[in-house]
Every structure is written in structure tokens, then in C-alpha cells.
Image (spheres, rainbow, N blue to C red):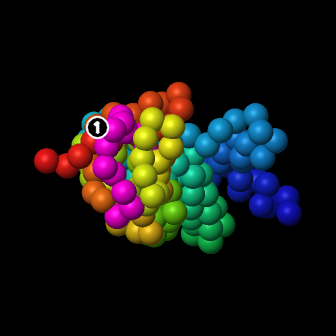
Amino acid sequence: METVFTLIGSFPTVVYTIPLGICLVFWLFSLLGVFDVIEVDIDSETGLAGLMATFGLAGVPITLSFSLLFLFAWSLSLCSDAWLLSLLPAGMLHHLAGVAVLILSLVLAVYLTGKITRPLSKLFVTHEARSNRSLLAKSCQITSMSVDENFGQAKVEDGGAGLIISVRATTPNDFTQGDSALIYDYDADKNLYFISKLD
């Protein structure tokens, strides 16, 4: 056990031990509700988001990407330190080999993290909800027996089962069940749609 702690605190593993420790503390506080998971705009082609997209790390929260990245880099560095660097004598060669392990661990960690985050990105897709005003200028089908200033219902096709909405129309009118109408206005306070005859 003492050897493991020695390796964790020695070069090159210590370079990844520190950020990995920060990630662990972050996740601990996240579980306690202190921090929120940070997301990056993956549509951006510049800055950090663009760099992450280049290496296939976009599509998941940045905190998850970095946590996996440092975990892989730390694990690879620790194993290399224990199995390879320990065979080399102390001195310049040992330090050069340590730098090589540091860089290779990061490169392999980026590759492994990208392999994991690509399939995981499907779990973090944000679907935009249809807004009420998006129904304006669409046609609907009357489902109630009539429509006036106080009552009326209609169905709007949305590619699925359809939406049943409350509609109103000025009277007199000859709207009846099964008629088609045009939605021309929306009252957000009352959640009502106003309809008129289709031309």
C-alpha cells in the first residue's frame, strides 16, 4: 500500500493525481447538491467547445469529459510508473521516460474518453419543446360541436397523436365538428387560441 501512495505522489502520476482529486471533490459536492454539472455548447466551433469537439469529447457535460479524461490518464500513468519506470535507474533517462509517459498517457486518455463519450452523448441530447406560439398560422380541426367566444376545442396535428387545444371564435359563425380552421392568435394568460375560417 505504501508503494501505491508513493507512486501516486511521484512524477509523472502526480500531475494527474491533482486534477483527478479535484474532479472527485467536485462529484462529491455535486452529490450533496452544492454544484451543478457543467455543460458546454457543442455547436460552437471555437474555444474549448471546438477543441473538445475536435477530439470527440463533446456531447456530454464537460465535467464528465474531464473526469473520464483524468481518470484514464491517471490510471495509465500509474500503471506505466509501476511496471515500466520502476525498472529504469534514477537520473536523466528516468525523467525523460516520465515525460514520455505523461504525454502518452494523455494522448491515450483522450482517445479512450472519446470512445466512451460518443455513445454517451445520445443520453444528453436536449429536445426543444414546442412553444404555444409555434401553432400560429397552422390549421386545426374542430372537435367540439360548435365554437364561440366562451367554448371550443380543436385538434392540431403534431406528427404524433395530435394536440387538443382550446379555441375561440367570434360569433356568428358556422363552425361545427370536423371543420378545418386557421389559428391566427394566442392568449398566453388564458392558454386560448383564436381561429378563423380557412380561405
Q: Residue at x 73, y 42 (%)?
A: 30
The image quadrant that residue 18 belongs to is: top right
In the rendered image, the residue lying farthest to the left is: 199
From this view, report whether residue 28 is shown above or below residue 145. above
User: The N terminus lies in which quarter of the figure?
Assistant: bottom right
Report whether residue 180 is seen. Answer: yes
Q: Nearer the viewer, residue 90 or 35?
A: 35
Measuring 81% from the left and 41% from the top, which residue is drawn there?
A: 32
Relative height, residue 154 to residue 63 (above, below): below
Lateral position of residue 50 relative to residue 77, left or right: left
144 sits left or right of 48 in the view: right
Query: Residue 111: where, in percent of width, then height?
Result: 41, 64
Residue 148 position within the rendered picture, expressed as x and y whole percent measured from the top left:
43, 41
Relative side of 132 to 26, left or right: left
Question: Residue tagged by mark 1?
Answer: 184
Give the camera-side residue of 106 and 160: 160
Amino acid on which disc 1 is placed = Tyr
Q: Nearer the viewer, residue 57 or 194?
A: 194
Magenta-drawn stretch, dominant element (helix, strand or loop): loop
Report helix, strand or loop for mark 1: strand
Q: Residue at x 57, y 46 (%)?
A: 63
Please report the residue visible at 36 percent of the width from the left and 57 percent of the height from the top: 176
Within the magenta stretch, is there residue 4? no
- From the top left corner, tell me how far across and down residue 4 is, in percent: 77, 61
* Residue 88 seen in render: no
70 or 131: nearer the eye?
Answer: 131
Q: Residues within 10 Å of mark 1 (few under 14, many from 20)?
A: some
Instruction: Estimate the x, y position of residue 151 in percent, counting from the top left.
Output: 50, 43
Residue extending farthest to the right is 1
User: Magenta span covers which residues?
Assistant: 167-178
From the viewer's perspective, is 70 left or right of 10? Answer: left
